[in-house]
Amino acid sequence: MVAGENDIETQVINIAQINRLTVEPPDSDALVAFVSPIHGFNYPPVMLYFIFRFPKGSNKVLLLSTRGGTLVGKFIVPGISGIAFYLSALVLKIKGYSIKALFPVDLPSNWISLHPGLNERTVKYLHERNKERVTSFARKVFSGGTSFKGLYDIVQDTLVAPISLGYYFIGRFVLAKTFYASGDCDHCDACMTGCPVMAIKKIHDRPYWTFDCESCMKCMSNCPRKAIETAHGLLAAVAVVHSLVLLGLFHTYVAARFVEATDPVVGFVMKSLLFLGFLALSYRFIHYCMRFRFVERLMVFTSLTKYKFWGRRYRALKG
């Protein structure tokens, strides 16, 4: 809209729809903007890998993040960008680019795997307010200005840096094995064809989420039947069994003798890998058993996303 007002030619590139292994360099005089949601206090891997592969250049660059905000009364409670801006800005700066903006946008969080969905009033209000903010930002940078509002949050961003690293290496793999399609699925395959990283495949005639899943929630938000849920019950059961049984065996036969006595970090990594392996096996087993009505119903009724108070789904508003 703002670009049109100023007769500025624009090109929008959806990195989910291009060959990200061979990225074409931008025109030398182009203003380049990277826009991405925040996942676990960082840009998701698909965006990070794209930035790392982006060709060297000297263009002016804008970095924008859409992060999960919410509303208390009429006060917008901002999300946290974590290390997204700092890591990406450093990489692009090394490549020769000039960073002209670090701009966060607090849109409604759709991460209903971890928290209740926001109500319609909150979603609409956040979109309307942020449309005003983004319009003002665009006018400023298109006229040659800069905006580094992302630096205002440097204290909390620094505090969550360890969490962002932990999520990148472990957390996202856990969440990748919590999605499933309930009996309401009509096999339209919209989740598979719409996945930005092609992380969903069909096994036993049901959608199956692989470890490539980045928990963007697009499949859950766009499913026309609202058939995709989060397996909170499965995750809780796996965590209990892992803690009571597998970790007991680990401590008895491995950690006490070889690992934790010398290196607690190695012990933590081994426990995490053990948990991920057990989760993957459990997920595959339950996926197979979902053909039985009793198992499918058990999964549904132990999923918080099934219930109205938690599982609100919403898309970006038009206009």
Image (cartoon, rainbow, N blue to C red):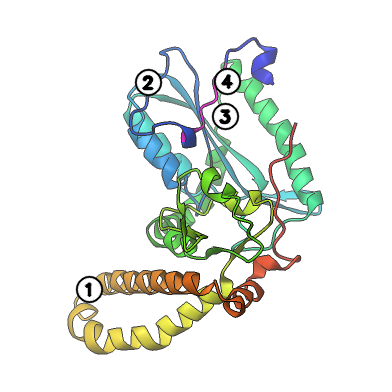
Dot 2: within a 10 Å radius of its alpha carbon, few (fewer than 14), some, or many (20 or more) residues?
A: few
Q: Where residue 80 sits: x, y (%)?
A: 56, 50
Q: Where residue 159 sits: x, y (%)?
A: 48, 56
**C-alpha gap between disc 3 and disc 4:** 7 Å
Residue furthest to the top: 7
Q: Which residue is mark 1?
A: 263
Numbered mark located on residue 145 in the image: 4
Q: Which residues are magenta?
A: 10-15
Vertical placement of 172 versus 90: above or below? Answer: below
The amino acid pointed to by label 3 is Ser
At mark 4, the secondary structure is: loop
Dot 4: within a 10 Å radius of its alpha carbon, few (fewer than 14), some, or many (20 or more) residues?
A: few
Dot 3: within a 10 Å radius of its alpha carbon, few (fewer than 14), some, or many (20 or more) residues?
A: some
Q: Which residue is mark 3?
A: 147
Residue 239 at least partly seen:
yes
At mark 2, the secondary structure is: loop
Numbered mark located on residue 25 in the image: 2
Please name which of the two marks, 2 or 3, marks the residue nearer to the observer. 2
Q: Where residue 247 sits: x, y (%)?
A: 35, 83
